[in-house]
Structures are given as C-alpha cells and as structure tokens.
Amino acid sequence: MSNTLNNNHLFINAAFSKSTERPPVWMMRQAGRFMKEYWDIKNKYSFLTMCKTPELAADVTMLPVDLLGVDAAILFSDILVTAEAMGGQLSFEQGVGPRFANPVRDKAGADALQTDVVHKLSYVADAIKVVQSRLNGSIPLIGFAGAPFTVLSYLVEGGSSKDFKRTKLLLNNEPELAHFILGKIAEVTAGYLNLQIAAGVNAVQLFDSWAQALSWDDYAEFSHRYNTRIIARLDRKDIPVISFCKGSSVFAPLMATAGPDVISIDWNVDLRDMKERLPAGMAVQGNLDPFVLYADKAVIKKKIYALFERMRDQKGFIFNLGHGIMPDIPFDHVKYAIDVVKEFHY
Ligand code: CP3
C-alpha cells in the first residue's frame, strides 16, 4: 500500500496528543470553490462526475496541497455519497446545493434504503489510491463521511434546510422510524469508512455538521448514539479519528465518550477552556471563526496568534477553522493564514 507516511508527521502527532514544534494546519472545505483552479475543473464536469472520477477527485484533492501547503490533505468527495449509494436520487444544482428527488418520509421510503452498498463506493477507494500515489508519503490524507443525523436531515428534507422542520417532526412524532433509518445509515457509514481505511487514508473525520439544531437529549439519542456505534466499528489501527460537529462547543464532552482521538470544535467556545474540560489525551481541532478570513491580514494574524497564545503548552492541538471555508473568502487570505501558522514557533 502506498500510504506509508514519512515518519513523525505533525498532523498525526498532534492528533495522538504528542508534542509538535508548531500546530499543524488544514482547513475544512479546503478542496473547494474559493480556488480559481477548482472552477477550472468544475466548469468542465458536474460535481458528482468529479467525485466519481478518481483522477479528477485526486486533482481537486491536490489543489490545496500544491497551492496552499497545508499539513494534511482531505479527500475531495461529499458527505452525501453514502445516501446516494443507499438509493437517494442525488443531484447538485448550481446555487441550490444538494437535492434528493425521492426524500425519505415514511416507512416505505425507509424500507427502500439499501445497506449492502459499500461496493458501490469503490470509486472512492480508487480515488484514495490515486491521491496516495501523488502524495507519496509527504503529508497524511484524511478520509471522511457524514454522520447519520446530518445525512438523515438531507434525506428527509430532500436537500439543505434552515430549520430542519421535517427532520425534527420525524424525531418527535416517529422516533422508531428515525432510529430505523439512522441505524441503516450508521451501518453503511462504518463500512464506508473502513473501505477508506483499507484503501489507505491516514485519518478519518466524521462530519455531523447540523447537530447544533438538536437539544442535548435529542443529540444524545439521535446523533451521538450512532456516532459512537460507528467509531466502535472502525478498523482504527494507527489511524486517528476526528469527530466534528457544529455545536461541539456544547456537545464535546459527550462526543468524547464516543472515543475519537480528536474533537473538532466550533468557534463559540474558548478552545483551551474546552480542552481542559475533555479527558486527558483527547486532542482538539479548531477553532478560528471562518469569517475572520474575510478581514484584513493584520486582523487574521492577530486572531491566529491570540488562539496560539491560549493553546501554549497544550499537546494535541490541530489548527483549523470552526467550520468550512466559505466560497467567497479571498484565496490570498486563506494562503496568508496558512503561512502565518507555518511560520509560527512557540
Ligand atoms: O473539505 C473539503 O474540501 C473536502 C471536500 C468536501 C466537500 N463537501 C466538497 C463539496 C467535504 C468534506 C464536504 C462535506 C460536506 N458536504 C458537508 C460537511 C462539511 C461542512 O461544511 O459541514 C456537508 C454539509 C455537505 C453537503 C453539501 N455538499 C452541501 C450543503 C453542498 C452545497 C453547498 C455547499 O456548502 O458547498 C455540497 C456541495 C459541495 N461539496 C461542493 C464541494 C466543493 C460544491 C459543489 C459545487 O462546486 O457547486
């Protein structure tokens, strides 16, 4: 397998809470629309074609590696490919985002979701192999999947939602049906992440982007329970597991009980305070407000330094944003932030 990393990698060391000379840096949604080079590819192919063509997925994965110099690559794909493999009729429309033509809203829809589908995602394994041959051990490759609650929300709503009204109606009125669907998604997700691990990723991240919509009790019952089940089933070996949700500033202590190596924290909380509330040896990732990257460069530097000052002497810290890069953030601001991190020394 071509995933043998050069030893002593910053990102892996930080993920396992070993000391590093500076925090490693990567950014959620780094392989995306804020780069002109992304659009050069996207203007020729549909988004799903890009995901399903290993050479194209590898080309996009490599853009932030080559143009930004990040310390980890994240595979170019989407959290909704599991739902598509299960039978969701997925499309991505410009300016609209993801859509499922057959939203799942009743028992018949839930029954129709297939679970013996991981083989349909072999294009992702192929993309991982192409990326690893290009990275050639220089930096780690992060694989990922959507967490069951977040994927459920897209299947039920039929696309993006502001308030998750239909999803919450399902959780409240038909909790057994919700659990039935979540169980199916969790089973596929665990198999899918293990497929990525077998194909050679060096870390995995579970994206539960919309967990913030849930109350504490509902988060525990409809999200955390399934994330725990998935993490327990991973063939982890020496592969760090990162758990991300929007809402981690509230849920992180509970997320920690699922046993990830790293929790990715949103920007509503002081990162050091949160780290000190987590079990010893639990690394954190985050947590710059992505909107800072719109600001003047002097402000960007000041805010990054303030975060680093708070995290002084802390092992187990990966610099990232509290959520993904927005498409209209200027490229040179993103590059500048990464350079600031890479030139930093405690
Ligand atoms: O981080 C990376 O750069 C790797 C690639 C990646 C994409 N999507 C590419 C993408 C990752 C990790 C994702 C995860 C994802 N997808 C999430 C969780 C991450 C988060 O920000 O919380 C979610 C909620 C989705 C669902 C999704 N996919 C939406 C809502 C959209 C459209 C609007 C949007 O926010 O981008 C997508 C499409 C998508 N996924 C694009 C990209 C580059 C844009 C496609 C285009 O070019 O139009």
Image: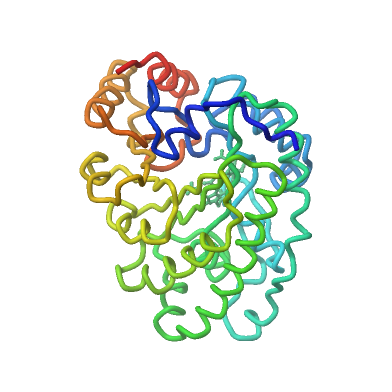
Q: Nearer the viewer, residue 305 or 136?
A: 136
Question: Residue at (74%, 70%) from the top-left corner?
Answer: 116
User: At which x and y percent is residue 149?
Assistant: 48, 66
Question: Residue at (79%, 42%) from the top-left corner?
Answer: 53
Question: Residue at (68%, 56%) from the top-left corner?
Answer: 91
* Position of 248 relative to 36 (above/below): below
Q: Quadrant of residue 238?
A: top right
User: At which x and y percent is residue 4?
Assistant: 67, 32
Q: Quadrant of the N terminus?
A: top right
* Position of 306 relative to 160 (above/below): above
User: At which x and y percent is residue 38?
Assistant: 64, 30
Q: Nearer the viewer, residue 133 or 289?
A: 133
Horizontal side of 16 relative to 127 (left or right) equals left
Q: Nearer the viewer, residue 282 or 110?
A: 282
Question: Residue at (29%, 18%) from the top-left corner?
Answer: 346
Horizontal side of 223 relative to 345 (left or right) equals right
User: At which x and y percent is residue 139?
Assistant: 59, 27
